[in-house]
Every structure is written in C-alpha cells, then in structure tokens.
C-alpha cells in the first residue's frame, strides 16, 4: 500500500469531472473551470459509481489531499498578510501586495474560490458514494476512517472559504451535470455554516484518523484534521464557548489514546543567564517546525519537493532569503510585532529563588529582535551576506524550513482552549493556561474556588497531575516536567512576573469582576497569539473573531492600521484600500458571485462608524 501511494503522488492526477468530482477510480484531477465561474460550460457528466473497494477509497482520499495542496500557501498568506504582524516591501509581488493592502480583484492568484469548491465537490462526491455499509470479518466498518476524514476535509475547507468570503454558496451534494452547476445555491454566513458542520461531523468525533504509513518521509497521519479539534474551531466561531472548550479538551485528552496525555511541552526560548549576566540565550528552533507525529505538530498539508512536481509551496521563498529570490524576502516582521515583543518583560528566578527581570533595552548587544519576549528572536534570524557584490541583510524564518505547510500544532489548541474558557466566563482558567500551565492541582486550588457554582463543569477538564507535570523554579532533578504556560515559552516564569498577573478589580461585584477580567484576559490571549503564531496564518482570523464577538470593528481595524507602528497609523490607513471599520470590507469577493456585497447604505454607515471611531 505504501508503494502504491508513493507512486500515485509522483504522477499527475487526471481530469475526470469538472469541479473535481471523483470517478469510480477515485483519482482526482488537474484544474478545470469551476462551476461557480461565470460562463463556464465545461462540465463532464458522471454515472452512478459507488466507492466500494479499498483501491477506490484510498485513491479518492489521497486525491482530495492532492487538491488541498492548491490552497495550502493561500491558507497561510490570507491569514497573515492582511493582519498586523507582517509588512510588505519593495520586493513583494503585486498579488501579495494587493492582499496586504485589501485591494484584491478577481485576477489575484489568492482570490480563487473555485479551488475551495474543487475540494468540497470532491468531498461531496466521496460522501455521497462511499459504501459505509461494508464490514470486515471483525464487524468493523471498512471505510469509516476515510469517510470521517473526508467529512473533516469538507468542514475545514468550508470554514476557510467562509472566513475569507463572509457569505458563500453552500452545497453538500456533488455537482455532476451542467444543469446542477447552473443552479442558484443558498448563501450562508460563518455562524450558519459552522452550526451545520458541527451537526455533520459530531457523530464521527471518536473515529480515528486513517494511517497509510510514511509518504515522502512524512507520517501520513499528519495529513488529516482531528474531528474533536475541528469541533472546537467550529464552536469557537459559532459562539458556543463551553462546547468549544469541551471539544478542545476532548482532543487533548484523547489524542494519544485512553489514559494518555498531550501536554504543551517545555520547549522555550530563554536566557541562560547565570542569574544576572544576561549574556547567554537558548533558542529552540524545533519547537516551531518539528514534523514528527505525536509531538507538537497535529496537521499539515504536504508540499512537493521541486516546482515541477505540482503544488510546490512558495512560503520558504516568501519568508526566507535565498538564491531563488536573490535574498529578497516578501514579508518581514512588522513594527507592530517588534514593538509588542519588545514590550514584554522577561522574568527569571535565580538559584536563590529571587525574581529578576531582563533589561528592557537590549539593543546595546547589537542583535536584532533581542529583548522582551524571546520568541521573535528565536524564529527570526537576520542573515548578513554578500550577493552580487552587494552587502545585504537577509532573513530566515525558522518556522519555514520544510516543503510542508503546517496548519495546527498543540500550542494553538491550548491557546484556543483559553480563549473559549475566557469567553465562557472563566478568565482565571484561561490565565493559568497562559501563565504556568494547568493540571488538576491548579484547577482545584486556583480555579474552582472562584467558580463554585460551576465546579461540575470545570472538573470535566481532567489534567492528571501525574501526567501533566508543571515546570517550577523549585523542581528538583528527576521531576521531568512537561507543562509550562504559553507565555513562559518566550518570557520566562510568568506566574512570578509582576507585569503578567491576572488583571483584577476586587471592588466590583462578582459579575462585573468576571467581566472586567474577561476583557483584560482576552487582550492577553490576542497578544499571546501574536507572540507565538506570527507568520503562521492565524492572526487575521484571530482579530476578526474577537472583533465580531465584541461587536467592535475597531478592535481589528486599529491594529491593522498600526501595522507600521502607532505613529504611522494615518499613513497606513491611506494605503489600505478598504475601510476596516466596516466589517463587510473584511472579506474577499469574486465577480459578485461569492463574498459580501457592500451596498450604498453600508458605505454611508461605514463612514459614520469611521468618524465616530476616530473621534
């Protein structure tokens, strides 16, 4: 089976149906006109072909993965270039520049919704035709893992589509004829699609992901989307915060099987300072790109090794200086990210258990990005070189060292768990995920006493202390800690850090006090997302989600306008072609067929909103 898959991935896929419907052989196909593209007449008809053999099903699933490669780079760039953590320069391509400045038209390579619908229609065909009634001699459903995996592919792809376009035609049956392709399909928004997908994949949450062994040196289990994790994401976007938190926890507690653990780990970038000298630091590059299954990476989309093989990822060339791009990268850390990183106070504890802080101004060492939180320095390397007899300053982003595109890693699950718990009314729980980490001792001693009426709900988050061992300054040799807080990964001992304590106002009544903490912890979570996941494609969506939850467009707009620093917000506002105080302009659109439609009434409203915000 391994040999068959390797050979299949080496050869091109044949066109079987327009809009990528799968034939009985299950092989996916090269590009063709999308059934939502205007004036498209290229639809190939398909007969009744159930997928009821191992070869059919296997080829079909791998074929869908192949089609997902088409949106791999886009998944990262749509979420990052439009945010506030990266900036463009003189060498940025026109398409990427237009994306960063919210000036995207139908010709832009990142605005091609047909690629999403190609995947969705593949999935729809598989779901409609896979024979899930077959059982083996042990009474196990033969194709249930593949069936669940394909439903997860469809859910994830629809989520990406609707987040980028706001409202999209929603189709769950395969398009096989021109007549079907010409129909008008109902348009649905983010919450409606999320609610539908939650109901669709919930019954399959306990099904294990398929495993086809090693494909091109990669564990094939990394090519799939765990359903518990997707349920967390869908519920988070739909505003079902308790359900989202439980789904994230279910993923963490069941990832490695029953009675197992999936801790955040102790990987970090830190000062090895001998207490006060601040002249030695440790950066752990692997914490950002390890591709071993069961470690920190959960899901990735595989990329080809050379451009001629098909879906070759350009992310390494966009973020890293090399001869292919003449050492000119397209995206660099924004001033906003640099300022945020430098604003953090790094806290350490000496061997005498005294609390000390790294100096705030480390520029005297002459090392770029060193100071504050160490993660930006840890994954961004400044390269001084001579190219074509010219001395240049290049860049290496350690997060992009392989041909594969990373989608989910376990730190993201913990951060989104914190976001869900905070939004559900438990800011103390969220804070401890950021600072120090959690296990059952922390939950019982530092969280439940503040939410006595919700103790039953909170105790279902079972992090056994023997399996989730916290790193502490007092820990002796042999304790083998495996859990720290997310902020600890770059800023030292956060629980001891007087600049990183849980915001509180005990003079307020209990309800107002929790609301006060929620608002402050939410900002801490957003900042932590920037420090941990910059360049990984999450930022724009994080800002969007929080702004929608708060019903506060300025939460997104003001940060993006301050991409080049607060002092340059006005000039950035004039460069960006959309009015980001109007949420309808956050989304892409395509030929009036897909995306949000801005009316004259919306335009009048946005002007008023912008004026009020500026005032």
Image (spheres, rainbow, N blue to C red):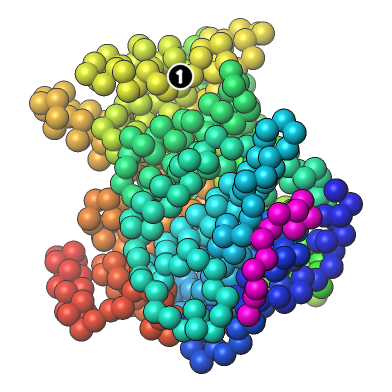
Q: Is residue 261 left or right of residue 339?
A: right
Residue linked to disc 1:
462
Give the total number of marks visible in the rendering.
Answer: 1
Residue 496 appears left or right of 367: left
Q: Quadrant of residue 457?
A: top left
For the stretch drawn in magenta, what is the main secondary structure?
loop
Give the class, few, some or many, for how many residues have Cα within 10 Å of label 1's Cα (few <14, many ≥20): some
Looking at the figure, which quarter contains the C terminus? bottom left
Residue 309 position within the rendered picture, expressed as x and y whole percent measured from the top left = 81, 69
Residue 320 to residue 54: above or below: below
Residue drawn 33% across the image and 74% down it: 596
Please state the horizontal and vertical placement of residue 49, each as a whole percent of the image.
67, 66
- Is 196 placed left or right of 507 in the picture? right
Part of the protein shown in magenta = 45-57
Please report the residue visible at 13 percent of the width from the left and 32 percent of the height from the top: 512
In the image, residue 6 above or below residue 90: above
Residue 178 x, y percent position in the rendering: 54, 84
Q: Nearer the viewer, residue 252 or 381?
A: 252
Kindly identify the residue that appears in the image at 30 percent across and 31 percent down.
Answer: 427
Judging depth in this view, the residue of 424 and 493 nearest the camera is 424
Pick the front one: 8 or 268 = 8
Residue ID at (33%, 58%): 192
- Residue 457 is a magenta residue: no
Q: Is residue 177 visible?
A: yes
* Res 500 seen here: no
The verdict on residue 51 being magenta is yes
Q: Position of residue 503 (x, y in %)?
A: 27, 31
Q: Examine the image and state in which quarter residue 331 appears.
A: bottom right
SS label for mark 1: loop
């Amino acid at each position: 089976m391994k040999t068959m898959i390797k050979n299949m991935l080496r050869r091109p896929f044949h066109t079987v149906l327009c809009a990528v419907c799968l034939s009985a052989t299950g092989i996916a196909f090269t590009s063709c006109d999308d059934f939502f593209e205007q004036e498209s007449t290229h639809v190939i008809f398909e007969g009744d072909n159930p997928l009821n053999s191992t070869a059919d099903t296997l080829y079909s699933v791998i074929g869908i993965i192949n089609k997902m490669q088409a949106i791999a780079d886009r998944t990262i760039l749509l979420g990052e270039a439009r945010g506030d953590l990266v900036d463009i320069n003189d060498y940025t391509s026109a398409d990427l520049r237009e994306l960063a400045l919210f000036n995207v038209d139908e010709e832009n390579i990142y605005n091609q919704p047909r690629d999403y619908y190609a995947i969705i229609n593949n999935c729809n065909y598989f779901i409609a035709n896979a024979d899930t009634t077959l059982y083996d001699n042990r009474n196990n459903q033969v194709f249930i893992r593949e069936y669940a995996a394909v439903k997860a592919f469809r859910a994830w792809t629809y989520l990406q589509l609707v987040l980028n376009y706001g409202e999209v035609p929603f189709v769950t049956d395969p398009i096989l004829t021109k007549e079907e392709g010409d129909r008008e399909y109902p348009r649905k928004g983010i919450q409606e699609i999320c609610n539908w997908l939650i109901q669709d994949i919930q019954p399959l949450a306990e099904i294990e992901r398929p495993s086809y062994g090693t494909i091109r040196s990669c564990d094939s289990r990394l090519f799939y989307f765990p359903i518990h994790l997707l349920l967390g994401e869908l519920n988070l976007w739909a505003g079902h915060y308790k359900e989202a938190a439980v789904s994230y926890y279910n993923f963490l507690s069941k990832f490695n099987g029953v009675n197992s653990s999936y801790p955040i780990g102790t990987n970090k970038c830190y000062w090895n300072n001998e207490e006060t000298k601040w002249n030695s630091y440790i950066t752990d590059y692997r914490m950002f790109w390890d591709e071993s299954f069961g470690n920190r990476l959960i899901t990735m989309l595989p990329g080809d090794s050379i451009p001629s093989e098909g879906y070759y990822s350009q992310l390494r060339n966009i973020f890293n200086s090399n001869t292919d791009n003449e050492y000119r990268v397209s995206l660099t850390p924004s001033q906003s990210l640099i300022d945020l990183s430098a604003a953090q106070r790094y806290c350490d504890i000496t061997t005498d258990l005294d609390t000390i802080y790294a100096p705030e101004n480390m520029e005297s060492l002459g090392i770029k990005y060193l100071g504050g939180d160490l993660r930006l320095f840890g994954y961004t390397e400044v390269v001084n070189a001579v190219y074509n007899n010219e001395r240049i300053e290049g860049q290496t982003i350690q997060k992009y060292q392989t041909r594969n595109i990373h989608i989910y890693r376990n730190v993201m699950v913990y951060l989104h768990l914190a976001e869900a718990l905070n939004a559900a009314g438990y800011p103390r729980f969220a804070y401890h995920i950021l600072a120090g980490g959690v296990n059952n001792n922390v939950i019982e001693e530092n969280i439940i006493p503040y939410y006595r009426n919700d103790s039953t709900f909170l105790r279902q988050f079972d992090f056994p202390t023997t399996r989730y061992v916290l790193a502490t300054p007092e820990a002796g040799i042999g304790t083998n800690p495996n859990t720290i807080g997310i902020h600890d990964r770059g800023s030292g001992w956060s629980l001891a850090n007087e600049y990183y304590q849980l915001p509180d106002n005990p003079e307020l009544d209990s309800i107002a006090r929790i609301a006060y903490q929620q608002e402050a912890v939410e900002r801490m979570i957003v900042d932590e997302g920037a420090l941990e996941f910059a360049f990984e494609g999450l930022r724009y969506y994080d800002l969007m989600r929080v702004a929608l939850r708060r019903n506060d467009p300025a939460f997104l707009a003001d940060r993006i306008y301050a991409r080049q620093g607060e002092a340059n917000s006005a000039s950035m506002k004039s460069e960006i072609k959309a009015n980001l105080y109007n949420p309808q302009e956050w989304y892409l659109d395509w030929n009036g067929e897909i995306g949000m439609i801005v009316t004259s009434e919306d335009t009048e409203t946005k002007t008023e909103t912008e004026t009020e915000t500026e005032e």
